[in-house]
Amino acid sequence: MPNPRHTRPILLLALLLAVPPVRSAAPDEAELARQRTDFLAAEQALDARKDARYRQLLRGLSDYPLLPYLEYRRLRGDLVRASSEEIERFLTQHADTPLAGLLRNVWLEQLARHGRWRDYLRFYRSGSDTERHCHYINALINTGQLSRAMPLVKAVWLHGESQPKACDPVFKTWSDNGGKSETLVWQRIALAMERNNTRLARYLGRSLPTGQQPRLGRWVEIHRDPARLAGHLKALAASPQGGRIALHGFSRLAARDPQQALRLWHTTQLPDLLDEGERYRARRALGLRLAARNHPEAITWLDSFAPTTTDQRLHETRLRLALQQRQWLQARGWIEALPKRLGESERWRYWRARVLRELGEDEAAEALLRRLAGERSYHGFLAADLLGSDYHLTHTPLLLEQALIEGVARLPGVARARELLHLDRYLDARREWSLVTTGMEREQLQAAAKLAQSWQWHDRAIFTLARTKHWDDLELRFPLQHARHITAKALNQKLDDSWVYAVVRQESAFSHDAVSPSGARGLMQLMPATARYVAKKMKLGKVTKGDLFDPLTNITLGTHYLRMISEGLDNNQVLATAAYNAGPNRVKTWLPEQTTAPDLWIETIPFTETRSYTQRVMAYAVIYDSRRGKQPLRLSERMPPVKPLAQDMVAQSPRPQTTPESGEGT
C-alpha cells in the first residue's frame, strides 16, 4: 500500500495540472457574495429546524466551497439520530477537510457514551488524544481483546499528570491483571514530582506498602522546602529512592539558592548518594543556576566540564560568562572548541570576530566580518556596523507563474479557507490552511503564501513562505498592515514607528486574533491584566478580553505600555524590547555593574527566548525602516550602551506575556 504522505504532493500536483484553463482567475464575486448570504441563512434555518427553508437555500449552494460545513452542522446537531453509515459517508466524502476529524471525534464521544464499543473500534484512528485513546483500550477490553489492550496501558499510566476519567476503568482492569507494580508506582511518583504535582504523588502513594509511605512524605517535604534536604540525607542514604529524591531536592535548591546548594555539595555526603548520571545532572543544574545569578563560583564550576563537553547549553553558558567578564582569551578558546555546525552559525562567527578584534587581531577579524556583513540579519547588521559598510536590504520579489497561483487558488481547501476568512471564521480558516498546505511542494507553498498575502492574511503568508526558506521577498515577510494606526499611535507616544512595527511582527506576525498559551492577546500580545492596567492609566474605561482583538484598541494600549516600559528603562530601546518580553523588573536585575556594549549585553541575557526576541526585534526594526522608504537607522545608533541600574529605574510595572516564537528566520 503506498504511503499517503508520499502520494499527497503528487496528487496535489496532478490536481493543479488537471484544472482546465479559465478565462479569469477571479471567482464570480457577486455570485459568491450571494452564496455567503444564503449560507448564513441556511445555518440559521438548520438551527431553527426550518427544514423546508434549509432545503430551499441548499439548492443554490451546490457549488459553494463551504457546503460541507452545512452537512457537518446538520450531522453534529443531531448525532443521536445519525447512523454509522451517514457518518462514514461524510468522513469518506470530506476526508480532505478538517471537518472529517472534528466529526470523527464527536462521533467517537457519542459511541463511547453509549457503550457501542465495536463501532468505536471501527471509527477510531491512532494519534487521538488521551481520552479517546483510553476509550479505544476500553473498547478492546469490552470486545474480548484483553491481550491487545493490556500492553497499551503502561505508556498512558506513566504520566506526571492525572489522566482523564475515561482511563479509570482501563487502569483498574490493568491493575487487576497484574500490570501495576511498586516500581511503576515510584516511577510515576517521580514524574508527578517533576511536574510539581504533589497531589497526584500523594494519591499514588496510597497504593504503596505502609513501610514505603514515609519516603514519599520525605520527598514531598523536600520538594516544598528544599533547604530541608540536608536534614534528610542520612535517611535518604538508606532508601532505594534516595538518589532520585536527593537529586530532585538539590535541583530545586539550586534554582532557589545556588549559594546554599554549593555549600551543601561541598560539606555533606550528598554527592555520595548519587550515581554517575545523577551527579552529572546535579552539577549541571547548579552550574547553570550559578551562571544565571552571575555567581563568582560559576566559572570554576563550569570549567570542571571542560571545553570538550558535548552539552551545548553548558558550553554556550560558559562561553557567555567569558564574554560577560571580558575574558577574551578564554572566550576564544571556548569558541574554537564549539562543534563545527554551531561554530559556523552567524552568532558565533560574529563573536569570533569580536573577540579577535579585542585581542588585536584586526586582519583576521575583518575577514570574518566581511563574509558576515552580507547577511540580512541581526549579526549581519552588527558586522556591517563594525566595518562601516552598507546593510544588505535588497528586496527580491517572489516570481511565480500566474497559472500556478490560480491553480492553488482553485484547490478546494484553499477556496474554503478564503471563504472562511470572508466570514471572519479565523480558526476554521487556519485549520483548512494547515491541512491543505500539508504535503505541498515548495512552489505550491510559495504560491499559497502569495495568495494569503493578497488576502491580507499576513501571518499565514509569513509562516507558509518560511517553510520554503525563501527569505528575500521583504514585502511578503514584513507587511505594512495597520499602517495608519501604528504610525499615529507611535507618534502619539513618541515612539519609533519602525520599532513598533518590529514588535508587532515578532509578537503576532500581524494576526489580530492571536492568543498565546499564557493568554496574551492580539497584535501586540497584551495580557488582559496588563491591558486593564494600561487602560486605567489612560482613563479609557473597562477593556475586555475581546476588545484586545480589535487592532486599534490593541495598538493603542500596546504602544502606551511600550512607552511606559521605555521611560522606566532610560528610554533605551534594547532594554525596553527585552522588557516587553521578559518584564521590566526582571530586566532591571540583568543590568550590568558597569556600562556595557549593547551587543554584549544582549548576548548575555540569561533567558534564551528573550535574547532571541530582542535580536529579532532589533533586526526587524532596521528592515521596517527600509520597507517604509526611510534611511535605515543603524543598529550602532539604535542600540545605545547599557548602563547600570539608576535610582529612577527602580519603579515596578506589569508585563504582557508573549506568544512562542515561530522559529522563522530573519
Image (spheres, rainbow, N blue to C red):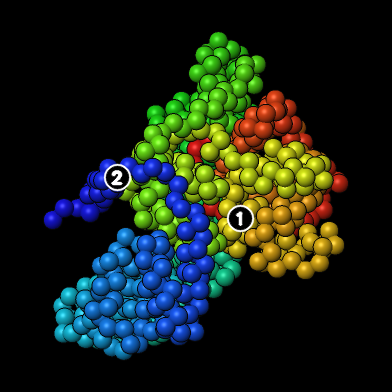
Amino acid carrying mark 1 in the image? His
Relative to 238, 353 lies left or right:
right
Relative to 550, 188 lies left or right:
left
Q: CA distance from mark 2 to mark 1?
A: 37 Å
SS class, disc 2: loop
Which one is nearer the viewer's eye here, 373 or 473? 473
x and y, in percent, of residue 104 in the image: 32, 73
Is disc 1 surrounded by few (<14), some (14 to 19) or many (20+) residues within 10 Å?
A: many
Residue that label 2 marks: 20
x and y, in percent, of residue 275 in the image: 37, 56
Front tag of 2 and 1: 2
Relative to 243, 96 lies left or right:
left
On residue 512, the disc is: 1
Which one is nearer the viewer's eye here, 313 or 550? 550
Q: Residue at x 50, y 74 (%)?
A: 41
SS class, disc 1: loop
